Amino acid sequence: MVAEAAVVLLSGGLDSTTAAAWARAEGYRLHALTIDYNQRHRIELKAAARVAVALGVERHMVLPLDLSRFGGSALTNRAIAVPKGGVGPGIPATYVPARNTVFLSLALAFAEASGARDLVIGVNAIDYSGYPDCRPEFIAAFQTLANLATKLGVEGARFRIHAPLAELSKADIVRLGVELGAPLAETWSCYDPDPVGGRPCGLCDSCRLRAAGFAEADVVDPAQQVPPLAKLGKEPA
Amino acid sequence: MVAEAAVVLLSGGLDSTTAAAWARAEGYRLHALTIDYNQRHRIELKAAARVAVALGVERHMVLPLDLSRFGGSALTNRAIAVPKGGVGPGIPATYVPARNTVFLSLALAFAEASGARDLVIGVNAIDYSGYPDCRPEFIAAFQTLANLATKLGVEGARFRIHAPLAELSKADIVRLGVELGAPLAETWSCYDPDPVGGRPCGLCDSCRLRAAGFAEADVVDPAQQVPPLAKLGKEPA
C-alpha cells in the first residue's frame, strides 16, 4: 500500500520544517507548498528549497502570490518597520492580513487537486507573536470550512488539518525537531535580514523566539542564527 | 460621513456583476478583486475590467494566482474537456478545487489590509452547477472563520460575507441586474470560448444557465451571449 500524501505548508522556518519532519515521521509522503508572497525575508524561500531536499519531499511547489499588493504588514510593505524591541502584548506589525487563511486555502486546493486529504501547518500558540491565525480555534474552523468547501468533502472524504506544534513551546519545538532529525541547520527565521550579507537581525520577534527556544532547550542552533547577544554565553558543543 | 468600502469578488460574469451592482445600491464604495488564475476563459478578465469601469469601482485589483499549477479542473487544465451535454446532477469537471475558499481568503486579506469589513460574492445555489463552495453553509462557515482569522476580528470588528444572490434563481438574478442597472452588456459567462473569435460556445453549463435565465426573465441578453439555438425564437426587442 502506498503511503498517503500530506500537503505541508513550508516556509523554510523552524516551525514549518519541524512540522514537515513530524509528517514524515507519521508516514506521509510529503507535498510541500511554499508561497512566494513577496515577503521582506524572501531569503526564506532558499531555506525552504534546502529543507525540501533534506526532508526528501516528493513534490515541492513554490507558488508566487504577491501579497504586497495588499500591504498592511511590515513583512509586505517596506515602509512599515519590523518591531525590534522584544515580543510584547497585542498583535504586532508583522501580522500579514489573513495570511494563514490564504495559505491554508491554497494548501487545500493543492491537496484536493492531487487527492491528498491531510494538510500540515506549523502554527503554534505558546511562544508566538499573538497572530490570530495561529490559534487552535482558527485551525478547527478551517477544517470545518474545508469539508464544506470541497468536492471531496461533499463526497464524504474528510480533510484533516494537522497543527502538530499547536501546544508546544518554542523549546519543545526545538527538542522535537532534533528528535525527528529535522534539518534545522537549513532553516531561516529572521523577518528582517541584512540586505547585503543576508544575516539574521537578532532583534525581531522571530529571531528572539528562536534564540530563546534553542537556549531553553539547551541546543546550539545549527543554523547559527543566534546572534552573540542572545546566546546567553553558550558556546558550541 | 464617507461610505464604507466593500470588497467585491468580480469575475466579469453575470452573477458577480449583479452582486457588485447590489453592493453599489446598498451604498458601499466598491473595491473589486479579480483573480487572474490562468483560467481557460481568461477573456472574462476583459469583461471584469469593463464592468469595473461601468460600475464606477473605486479600486480594481487584478491579482495573478496561477491555479493551473494545481490543475484538477476543466477550467485550469486544457486536457480536461468542458462538459457540453447540459447541466446534470453531481459536481462537474469545471469545479476548481477550493476556488471560492481561495478567492474569499484573498478578498479577506484585501479587506483587512484596507480596513473594509464587508465582502461580497455572487454565489448562488439555485440555478448553478452544484459547486460545494456556492452553498449558504459554506458562506456562513467562511464568515465564522474570517472573524477568528484576523486582527480586526479579534479586536471586535465583524467581517460580513454578503452573498446577495444566494437564494435567487438565474432569472431572478437577471431581473435584479436589470433593476439595478448592472452593466450586463459587458459581462462574460462562457467557460469555453472559441479561441479565435472569442465567442461563447453556447453549450457549456455557464452558457446554458445564462441563456435559460434571460429566457425565463424574458429579457434579451444585451451581451448577445445567447446563441441562436438557445434563444427559443426570441428576437431582440
Image (spheres, coloured by chain):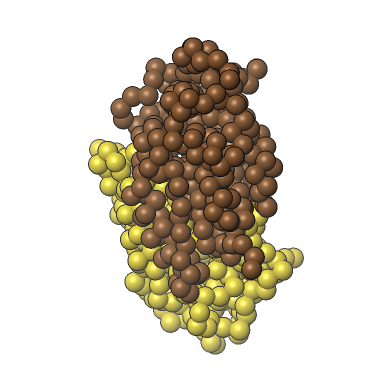
Chain colours: A brown, B yellow
- Farthest residue to the bottom: give it: B233
How many numbered circles does the render carry? 0
Quarter of the figure with the N terminus of chain B: top left
Q: Position of residue B8 (x, y in %)?
A: 42, 52
Q: Residue at x 44, y 48 (%)?
A: A163
Q: Is residue A234 left or right of residue A144?
A: right
Q: Residue at x 33, y 49 (%)?
A: A137
Q: Residue at x 64, y 65 (%)?
A: A2
Give the vertical position of A228 relative to B61 (above or below): above
- Farthest residue to the front: give it: A237
Residue A121 in view here: yes
Q: For residue B86, what is the image quadrant? A: bottom right
Q: Is residue A58 left or right of residue A206?
A: right
Q: For residue A109, what is the image quadrant? A: bottom right
Question: Is residue B39 or residue A55 the one in the foreground?
Answer: A55
Q: Position of residue A31 (x, y in %)?
A: 62, 53
Q: Position of residue A65 (x, y in %)?
A: 58, 44
Q: Position of residue A223 (x, y in %)?
A: 60, 26
Residue B51 in view here: no
Question: Is residue A99 or residue B112 the one in the foreground?
Answer: A99
Question: Is residue A8 or residue B31 the one in the foreground?
Answer: A8
Q: Residue at x 54, y 87 (%)?
A: B233
